[in-house]
Image (cartoon, coloured by chain):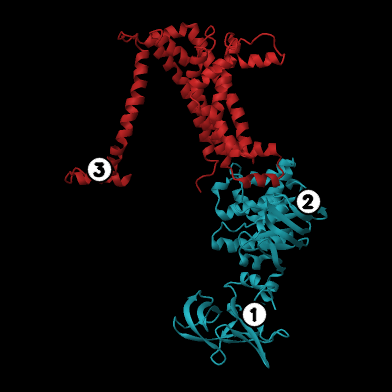
Chain colours: A red, B cyan
C-alpha cells in the first residue's frame, strides 16, 4: 500500500501519461473493480435504495407518490395483520431453522461414515435443493390436498384416521405443513455444507480421542461440535436468511392463508404492494425485515469472531 | 507397564493382504522400533496394537491379555501421531488433561499430573496456549505430554519426528530416548528413518512388504544383517553391493563380474564357484597405496566430519566414507582396500547372508 501511495503523491510533479497510469496499482485496482461495482450498483444498491425510498412515500401502482415520512410505518405499527406476519415469520424461521440444523447435522454425520454407495446417497440428498422451489411446492400442494392427500390416504388405509387431514385449511396445520415443506427443501444445503465441514476434521483427532477414552458421544461433543462451530455459524446464517425471506413456497401453498396464519413478511409485502397496489406500504414492510436480517448476520458474525483465534489455520 | 506380544499377525484390506504373519516379542520396558520403507506395513501394525485397525489373523497381547477384540480405550495405551493430532480448540493444558477428564479423575489429580508432565517436557510456560500458537517441536512435546499424563502400559509412536526440521529431529530424538530412560514405559515406535532406529532402539524390527526381515539390537543388525535388504537399509550411506562369485584357490577371493578380484577373509565351506553378492559398507574401505585397488573418483562430497567418495571400482559404482581428509578430485585414481574382516557375503539368488 505504501508503495502505491508514494506513486500517487509523486504523480503531480512528474508528467502525466498513460504508461504511468498503467503501472499505478491504485488506478488499475479501481479500473478492474469498476465492472463489478457497476453491476452491484445497478442490481443491488439501486433496488434496495428505491425500496427504502418507496417506504417513505405513498406510491401506488400507476401513480407516483409523494414523501410521507414515517406514515407507512405508523400505519404498520397499528396493523394487527402486520404484527401477525412478524410473529409468523419468526415462528417459521425459528422452528424451520432448528429442525433443518438438527436433521441436517444428523444426515451429515451419517453421510460422513463409511457407507456403501456413499456418492449415490450424497447425490440423492441434494435432490430437494436442486428441484425448483415452485415445482416442489406444487408437489407439496398435492401432498397436502384436502381430499387427495397421499398422507391422509395412507393414514386412512392404515386405519389411523377416519377423515382426511385438513392440512392447509386449519391455522395450526397450515403452519406446520409449510414449515415441514421448508425443512424438506432446506435440509440438503445444511447437510452438504456441514458434511464438507466434517471432512475437514482430521481423522487422527478422532483416533486420538478414541485412544484418550472418548465414547462416540463424547467425540461428537468435545471434538466434532467445537471444530464444526465456525461452519455451523456460516451455514445457519445463510439458512436463517433464506428462511426469513422465504416467499415462493408460501405463495404457492397457501398465499398466506388461512386467515393470514401463514403470511410471512415477504408474502404480506408482496400482497400489499402488487395485488393490493400499495407500493409504499409494501416497501415499508420489506424494509421492516432489514433489522431482523441484520441481527441474524451480526449474531453469526460475533459467533465466528469469538472462534477465530481458537481455530487453527495460519501456522 | 507391560510386555507386548505379537503372534503371527496378519492384516488384509479386502483382498489385499498387507501384513503376512508377523511375530514380535516386546519385553516390559523395552524400546522397540519398527522400521522399513513406506508401505511395508509398519504403521498398520502399530495401529493394530492401538486398536485403530482390526486384526485379520493372529493374536496381539498386551500384558497377559489378548486385546484383539478389546476397544482402544480399554487397552491402556497412549499414541503420538505423526501430525500430533492435538485438539486445536483446546489449550495445551486441556489437551493433556482430556483423557483424565473423560475418566472423571478428580480435579486436583488432573492438575498435578498435567503439571508433572509439563515439568518433564518443559511445557510449564505454554499451558495456556493453543496448539496453533506453538512451534513444531513444542507441539510434538505436547503430544508426548498427552501420552505421559495417562501413565499408560505402552507408548506408541507413529513417525513422530517426520514433520520436524533436521535439527529439531536430532534434538527430539535425544529427548524421547531420555524420556524412555526415565519412565521405562514399554514403547513401540514406527519410523522410516534408519538413523532414528539405530540411535534410539533397544531392539529394531526391520519390515519389508508386510514381513519381518530381521529383528535384533541395532549393532547386531549393522554387524550381521540377515539379508541384502537389511544390509542395504541399515547404515548410511548404504552398503555397496558387488555381484560376482566366490573363488577358493588356497586363499578365498571374490571375483566380481568385471573381472575384479576382491579380498575375503574366509569363505563358507564348499562355496567355490558359487555366485554371490559382495557387500562392503562405505566406511569399511581404507585408502591403502600398497594393497588398494585403483578406483576412479567420480564425485567427492566432504561433510566436514567425514568425506564421501563416489568412485568406479572395476566398472562398479561404489561409495567410500573416510574420517580423514581426502584430497582427491574427480578423475583422480584412489587406491581402495576393503577390510576383508568386515565383508558380508550374500546368496545371489535369495539375498540371504552366507
- For the C terminus of chain B, which image quadrant? bottom right
The residues tagged by marks 1 and 3 sit, at their Cα atoms, a distance apart of 78 Å
Q: Find out whether the residues at labels 3 and 2 contact each other: C-beta distance under 8 Å.
A: no
Q: Nearer the viewer, residue A209 or A118?
A: A118
The residues tagged by marks 2 and 1 sit, at their Cα atoms, a distance apart of 44 Å
Judge from the rendering whether residue B295 lies leftward or rightward of residue A25; answer left or right. Answer: right
**Circle 3 residue:** A8
Q: Are marks 1 and 3 on the same chain?
A: no
For the view shown, which residue lies furthest in the left direction? A15
10 Å crowding of disc 3: few (<14), some (14-19), many (20+): some
**Circle 2 residue:** B67
- For the N terminus of chain B, which image quadrant? bottom right
Which numbered dot is residue B16? none
Nearest to N terminus: mark 2 or mark 1: 2
Q: In front of the other: label 1 or label 3? A: 1
> Which x, y percent locates residue A206?
65, 44
Q: In front of the other: label 3 or label 2? A: 2
Helix, strand or loop at mark 3:
helix
Amino acid at each position: 500500500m505504501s508503495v502505491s501511495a508514494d506513486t500517487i503523491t509523486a504523480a503531480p510533479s512528474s508528467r502525466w501519461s498513460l504508461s504511468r497510469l498503467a503501472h499505478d496499482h491504485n488506478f488499475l485496482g479501481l479500473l478492474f473493480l469498476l465492472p463489478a461495482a457497476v453491476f452491484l450498483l445497478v442490481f443491488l444498491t439501486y433496488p434496495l435504495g428505491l425500496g427504502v425510498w418507496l417506504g417513505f412515500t405513498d406510491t401506488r401502482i400507476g401513480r407516483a407518490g409523494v414523501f410521507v415520512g414515517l406514515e407507512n410505518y405508523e400505519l404498520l405499527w397499528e396493523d394487527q395483520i402486520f404484527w401477525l406476519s412478524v410473529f409468523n415469520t419468526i415462528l417459521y424461521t425459528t422452528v424451520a431453522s432448528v429442525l433443518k440444523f438438527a436433521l441436517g447435522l444428523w444426515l451429515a454425520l451419517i453421510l460422513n461414515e463409511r457407507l456403501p454407495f456413499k456418492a449415490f446417497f450424497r447425490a440423492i440428498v441434494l435432490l430437494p435443493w436442486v428441484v425448483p422451489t415452485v415445482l416442489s411446492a406444487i408437489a407439496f400442494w398435492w401432498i397436502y390436498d384436502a381430499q387427495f392427500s397421499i398422507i391422509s390416504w395412507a393414514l386412512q388405509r392404515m386405519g389411523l384416521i377416519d377423515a382426511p387431514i385438513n392440512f392447509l385449511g386449519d391455522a395450526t396445520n397450515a403452519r406446520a405443513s409449510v414449515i415441514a415443506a421448508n425443512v424438506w427443501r432446506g435440509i440438503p444445503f445444511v447437510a452438504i455444507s456441514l458434511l464438507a465441514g466434517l471432512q475437514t476434521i482430521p481423522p487422527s483427532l478422532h483416533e486420538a480421542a478414541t485412544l484418550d477414552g472418548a465414547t462416540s458421544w463424547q467425540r461428537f461433543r468435545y471434538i466434532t461440535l467445537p471444530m464444526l462451530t465456525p461452519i455451523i455459524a456460516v451455514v445457519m446464517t445463510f439458512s436463517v436468511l433464506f428462511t426469513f425471506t422465504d416467499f415462493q413456497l408460501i405463495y404457492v401453498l397457501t398465499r398466506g392463508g388461512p386467515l393470514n396464519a401463514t403470511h410471512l413478511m415477504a408474502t404480506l409485502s408482496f400482497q400489499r404492494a402488487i395485488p393490493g397496489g400499495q407500493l409504499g406500504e409494501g416497501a415499508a414492510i420489506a424494509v421492516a425485515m432489514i433489522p431482523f436480517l441484520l441481527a441474524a448476520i451480526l449474531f453469526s458474525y460475533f459467533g465466528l469472531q469469538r472462534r477465530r483465534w481458537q481455530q487453527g489455520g495460519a501456522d | 507397564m507391560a510386555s507386548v506380544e505379537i503372534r503371527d499377525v496378519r492384516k488384509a484390506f479386502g483382498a489385499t493382504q498387507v501384513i503376512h504373519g508377523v511375530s514380535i516379542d516386546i519385553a516390559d520396558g523395552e524400546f522397540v522400533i519398527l522400521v522399513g520403507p513406506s508401505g511395508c506395513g509398519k504403521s498398520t501394525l502399530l495401529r493394530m496394537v492401538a486398536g485403530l485397525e482390526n486384526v485379520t489373523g493372529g493374536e496381539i497381547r498386551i500384558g497377559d491379555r489378548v486385546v484383539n477384540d478389546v476397544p482402544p480405550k480399554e487397552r491402556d495405551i497412549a499414541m503420538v501421531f505423526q501430525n500430533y493430532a492435538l485438539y486445536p480448540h483446546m489449550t495445551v493444558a486441556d489437551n493433556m488433561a482430556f483423557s483424565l477428564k473423560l475418566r472423571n479423575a478428580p480435579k486436583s489429580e488432573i492438575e498435578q499430573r498435567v503439571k508433572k508432565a509439563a515439568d518433564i517436557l518443559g511445557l510449564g510456560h505454554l499451558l495456556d496456549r493453543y496448539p496453533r500458537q506453538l512451534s513444531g517441536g513444542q507441539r510434538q512435546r505436547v503430544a508426548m505430554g498427552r501420552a505421559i499424563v495417562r501413565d499408560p502400559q505402552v507408548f506408541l509412536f507413529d513417525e513422530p519426528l517426520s514433520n520436524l526440521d533436521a535439527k529439531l529431529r536430532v534434538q527430539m530424538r535425544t529427548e524421547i530416548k531420555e524420556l524412555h530412560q526415565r519412565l521405562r514405559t514399554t514403547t513401540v515406535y514406527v519410523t522410516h528413518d534408519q538413523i532414528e532406529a539405530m540411535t534410539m532402539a533397544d531392539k529394531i524390527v526391520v519390515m519389508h512388504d508386510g514381513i519381518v526381515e530381521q529383528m535384533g539390537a541395532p549393532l547386531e543388525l549393522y554387524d550381521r544383517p540377515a539379508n541384502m535388504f537389511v544390509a542395504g537399509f541399515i547404515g548410511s550411506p548404504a552398503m555397496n553391493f558387488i555381484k560376482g562369485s566366490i573363488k577358493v584357490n588356497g586363499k578365498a577371493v571374490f571375483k566380481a563380474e568385471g573381472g575384479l578380484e576382491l579380498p575375503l577373509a574366509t569363505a563358507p565351506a564348499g562355496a567355490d564357484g558359487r555366485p554371490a553378492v559382495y557387500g562392503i559398507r562405505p566406511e569399511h574401505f581404507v585408502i591403502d597405496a600398497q594393497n588398494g585397488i585403483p578406483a576412479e573418483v567420480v564425485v567427492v562430497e566432504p561433510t566436514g566430519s567425514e568425506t564421501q567418495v563416489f568412485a568406479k571400482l572395476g566398472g562398479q559404482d561404489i561409495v567410500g566414507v573416510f574420517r580423514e581428509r581426502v584430497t582427491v578430485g574427480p578423475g583422480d585414481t584412489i587406491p581402495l582396500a576393503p577390510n576383508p574382516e568386515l565383508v558380508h557375503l550374500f546368496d545371489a539368488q535369495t539375498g540371504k547372508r552366507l
